Image: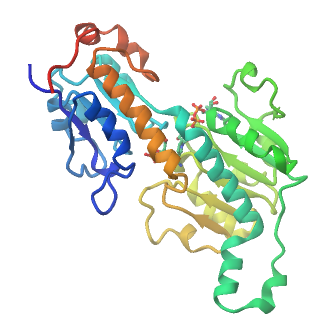
Amino acid sequence: MTAPRIGLTADLFDSRGRPMFGTGPLDLLAQAGLTWTRLPPDGGAIDPAAVADFDALLIGGSRLGEASLARDGGRLRIVARNGVGHDAVDGAALARRGILLTNSPVAVRHPVAAMALAFMLALGMRLPLKARLAREARWAERGDFPGTGLPGRTLAIVGVGGIGRELVRLVQPFGMRILAADPFVAPAQLAGLPVELMPLEAALAQADFVVIACLLNETTRKLIDAPRLALMKPTAFLINVARGPIVDEAALIAALQAGSIAGAGLDVFEREPADPANPLLAMDTVIATPHSLCWTDGFVDGVARDAIKGIVAAMQGRLPDHVVNPDAIGHGRVGQWLGKSAGPA
Ligand SMILES: NC(=O)C1=CN([C@@H]2O[C@H](COP(=O)(O)OP(=O)(O)OC[C@H]3O[C@@H](n4cnc5c(N)ncnc54)[C@H](O)[C@@H]3O)[C@@H](O)[C@H]2O)C=CC1
Ligand SMILES: O=C(O)C(=O)COP(=O)(O)O
């Protein structure tokens, strides 16, 4: 039996070639006698060779669809998403071959909700503009730009899953009214939370701050389109911490240019990396960050630890936590390795 091979996608490394989560999470592999390999840059989609030759993959934002599975030889046990959103991975195609797909939903909650709150505070206080006034010695103008405080204002959260509910908890001290639009959340999940569940349109029309925190799928693609943006107040801010394609970007640009909404906080874009010519990047009313504002120490370490624990479990013949394509579990391929270690390191 050959030593198990574990591949890490190239986008999990920083610009100097170091794992972006430091070495701590990788120690979990070493402690289990497992070694890892950095995969070559994949141009955005997992190379079929990675599926042919590896027992486990830890993946950042790379796409993995049927094309990536062309050389599957039956060896790959698990694809672990280093994050929670798995819209770029075809979990059903993996399940058909008996390959587990896992994600890391726990460690993301606080940092991503905190990122949404950071956008709310920074947009409301006009932080980038005020920082520029100081840098350019324009103190005389500081009274020209009153901000928007959070107390007494209305927050609408689109998607009250793990991140959305953490945001509800985080904004408690600010005394906001909190609306939620989520057709699929179980009422029990909102029990005890001071949230008014309502249709999206009603929430958009009343909100001063709208935070997108739902997943991307075919029901949420362009969910925030021109007619829905038109429902928002001209004083309201839109914040997207989830996935770019949930918002119709051309419609958002038009709404900002027309002043029909006050501003936007965007960590995610329809196309990533965002085109440098994207007008959103040049607007004074927009704070844009490169899909990484929440990458604090706790986020990068915690997410990678959870994902790597899943890989260790599968390599040791155990079912990992947070399997997002449970249909894979009944497949004969899983039956062949369950209870069996992937082999000596
Ligand atoms: N910018 C970043 O770095 C990060 C972005 N994310 C994104 O945040 C998303 C949410 O993460 P979690 O809260 O952990 O996921 P989750 O699965 O716990 O919650 C997603 C929520 O969206 C809701 N939803 C589904 N369809 C909807 C619709 N049509 N309208 C409104 N709500 C709808 C679901 O019912 C669920 O409550 C992830 O899927 C990911 O795309 C997550 C982590 C980091
Ligand atoms: O967890 C997610 O869905 C994220 O977007 C964060 O993970 P990433 O930064 O894409 O590796």
Residue under the image location 34 percent in, 21 percent down: 313
x then y, percent, for residue 283: 61, 73
Residue under the image location 22 percent in, 25 percent down: 76
x then y, percent, for residue 31: 28, 31
> What's the image's color scheme?
rainbow
Residue 148, compared with residue 324, is above or below; it is below
Is residue 202 at least partly visible in the picture? no
Query: Disc count in the image?
Result: 0
Position of 169 with respect to 76 (left or right) is right
Residue 239, compared with residue 284, is above or below; it is above
Q: Nearer the viewer, residue 74 or 311?
A: 311
Position of 2 with respect to 317 (left or right) is left
Q: Nearer the viewer, residue 71 or 8?
A: 8
x then y, percent, for residue 335: 27, 7
Which quadrant is home to the N terminus? top left
Residue 322, compared with residue 42, is above or below; it is above
User: Residue extending furthest front?
Assistant: 31
Position of 326 with respect to 199 (left or right) is left
Position of 134 with respect to 28 (left or right) is right
Residue under the image location 80 percent in, 84 percent down: 142
User: Residue extending furthest right?
Assistant: 152
Is residue 109 at least partly visible in the picture? yes
The part of the image, by quadrant, that contains residue 263 is bottom right
Which quadrant is home to the C terminus? top left
x then y, percent, for residue 103: 44, 31
